[in-house]
Every structure is written in C-alpha cells, then in structure tokens.
Image: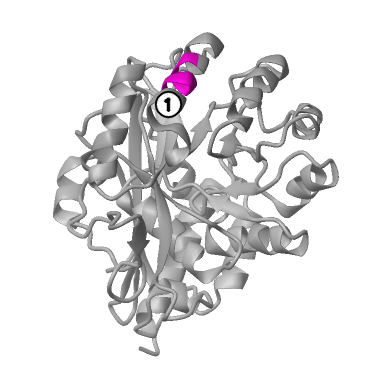
Amino acid sequence: MNNLVITHAEAFVTGPDVPRCRLAEDMGEVYETLTLLRLTTACGLEGFAGITTYSEHCFDESLGAALKPLLAGLPGKNVRDISAIWQYMMSRYNPMTPKPQSAIDIALWDLQAKSQNLPLYQLLGGSPANDSIPSYASTPLLDTPAEYVDFVRDLQTQGFDTVKFHLWCEPEKDMQLLKTIEEVFGNQLAFMIDLEERYSLEDALIISRQLEKMNCIWLEAPLPDTDLKGYAELRARTSVTVIPAGNTLLTPEMLSLAIDNHSWDSLRADVTYAGGFTGTRRLAELAAQHDMSIELQSWGYTATQAANLHLMLAISNTGYFEQPVPYSSHEAFCSTPIRTQSGRVKAPQGPGLGIKINWQQVAEQAFWHFETGSR
C-alpha cells in the first residue's frame, strides 16, 4: 500500500440511545456523545477514531465543530508523516485543543498499522506476547450501599476481581459505603474510588484515613487537578496512592510542574484527550523518567476503550484497563466489543485498532456530519 495520501475525511457526531448513568450525586444523567472520524487514502484504506465526550442535559456537538477546520487541511497529506501532521495540527488555532487533534492522530496511527497489517499496540512498540492486561470494573453511581454490594457480587461472577467505585461525592454517604464494603468484603476486594474532583482537602484527608485500612489501590481525583498544592499536602499526609482525574493538565510541561511539586503518586491520561498516541506517549515517557506509572482512563465507547488499550499494551508503566460496566451502555455501533475475561482484557483481533464499526448505523443516527476531500 504505497499511496497513503489522505483523500477524504469525514466526521460524525452521534448520541447513542443507551442507558445513561450519573457519576456523582450533584450530577444529572451523563449524555455520552460519540464523535467518530474516518480518514480514507488514495489506495482505499480507511482509518478511524472515536472520542467519547460527556455533558449533562443534552448531547454535545462541539468536538465535531472543532474538528471541521482541522480536517480541511488533511487531504493531500501522507499518513506516514504522522509526526509532522501532529505538529501541524497542534499549531492550528482551535478552541478545544488537543481533543480534535487526538482524533486525527489516532486515525492516522490506525491507518499506518493497517497498512503494515499489524495490531496497533505492536506498531507502537508492544510485544506480540504481551496482548492482555488486568482490568477493573468501573461502576456507575448507584443509589444505596446495598445496591453496590449486589453489583459487586454480580461483577465477581463475571470474572472481575478489582472494582472502581464512582461515589456520591458526599463525604458522609461515601464513608458509609466504604464501611459497608469493609464489613461485607473485608480485604478480599481490591478497589479504587473516584471522587470526580469534588472533595475539599479536609474531607479528602478524612476519607483517606478509612482507605488506609482497606485494600484500596488508589484514590482518584479527590481535588481539582489544578490544585497542585492541595494534592501535595494530601499526598504528604496519607499512605494511600493518590492520582489525578487526568482531563485538565495534558502536556509534559504542565505535568512536569505536578511532578516537581510531588502532587501525585501516578499520572493519569486518556489517549483520546491528550493528543492521541503521539501526545500521550510523551506523557508515558515523562512518567517513566520519574519512575512513575501512568494509568490510562478508558471510560467511554468501544473506540475510546480500544485506543487506550493499545497504548497500555505498548508501554510498561501502566497497571490496569478501565472496563465501563454495564457493558451494553458503551458498545454502540460496534460488533467487536472489548470485554473482560477472568480479570483481564486482550487486544482486539486484527490490524489497527482491531474493532469493527457499523458505519451505516452511524450515518443513519448521526446528528452532525461533515466531510471534505474527494472519494
């Protein structure tokens, strides 16, 4: 496949009709928008990316609008020039940098892997022998501690041995759930908690005392990611592993400030938010230089999960795949979902991202569409 010049670019914004959840008590139902990008080359090869974005009250079409001016510059560019295209895209004026560039970068890497008939993680430097990673079930917000207990028991029958709880983010209610988990499961359940950047430092210190007695793998996003001073104080006063949300500070320069400030035990990022594979690999390298891990979030639809999974399998300093549950809420338009088996997930089969999208369904259900170039 010698002619890898891009001839056509097409973006769809969709609002899949799936069950919606909440992720904190003060949050309404989350409308998870799936924006899909498809690039076509002169030789007919197609590459794609899927970005999940989140909003309350309605679906969000802003990522499609942010992609539109960038896509106009893609026809005529060669897929093999990923680094140069990334630099070009990052230097364009754009109100949502770097989410739209993330979509373009992922689609370019998907194309290049397909042109070499390789799974993406192998093109990114991963070993064929390293095709799976431990996973944890990432829960929606439930109504009562009893519902969480039943939910966890059901997850255990499905092969999960690690769970991340999205809590109410109300200290008293959250503490009661943790005590219930401790009473029912003891130290037999490994878990994380996600506080969605909604706690004060004082309340984060209180809940960390409870977590220190439990089998807690990490405390995620108790404070806003920008509160580097608060995180440094929290980390100095607890033995619990503390990590950020990973949605705000998205460049090596910004994250270096957090590292120098001793704000977190681990970095956190999302390939679909932090500049695609090109951008997020820089963050993984930064973490490795400081003997830190980088946990990649993959809450979202299958295309979002796949991008993060492939990078996880290509680097050595990450520990877990985030599996959104229930499964059905995040498998729209995809006939090859990613699912946990016996506590692990495997790389999708096939070249590139390795997943199949029903583009006819996407076109029929999209509420925003743009294309440029020639077919």
Residue 168: x and y, percent?
Answer: 45, 17
Relative placement, left or right, of 267 versus 40 is right
> Where the N terminus falls, by quadrant?
bottom left
Q: Report helix, strand or loop for mark 1.
A: helix
Q: Residue under circle 1?
A: 181
Residue 132: x and y, percent?
Answer: 39, 67
Q: Nearer the viewer, residue 102 or 256?
A: 256
Q: Nearer the viewer, residue 252 or 262?
A: 262
The magenta stretch spans residue 178? yes
| Scheme by which the image is coloured | one colour
Residue at far right of view: 260
Q: Residue at x 62, y 52 (%)?
A: 92
Per the picture, the main secondary structure of the magenta-coloured stretch is helix
Relative placement, left or right, of 68 versus 142 is right
Tell me the magenta residue range: 176-181
Residue at far top of view: 172
Q: How many marks?
A: 1
Looking at the picture, does residue 164 appear above or below residue 208? below
Q: Residue at x 79, y 50 (%)?
A: 256
Write down the quadrant of residue 128 in the picture. bottom left
Residue at far bottom of view: 2
The crowd level at tag 1 (other Cα within 10 Å; few <14, some 14-19, many 20+) is: many
The magenta stretch spans residue 202? no
Residue 214: x and y, percent?
Answer: 55, 33
> Where the C terminus falls, by quadrant?
bottom left
Q: Nearer the viewer, residue 153 or 200?
A: 153
* Amino acid carrying mark 1 in the image: Ile
Relative placement, left or right, of 25 versus 286 is left
Q: Nearer the viewer, residue 361 or 285?
A: 285
Looking at the picture, does residue 299 appear above or below residue 123? above
Q: Residue at x 50, y 64 (%)?
A: 311
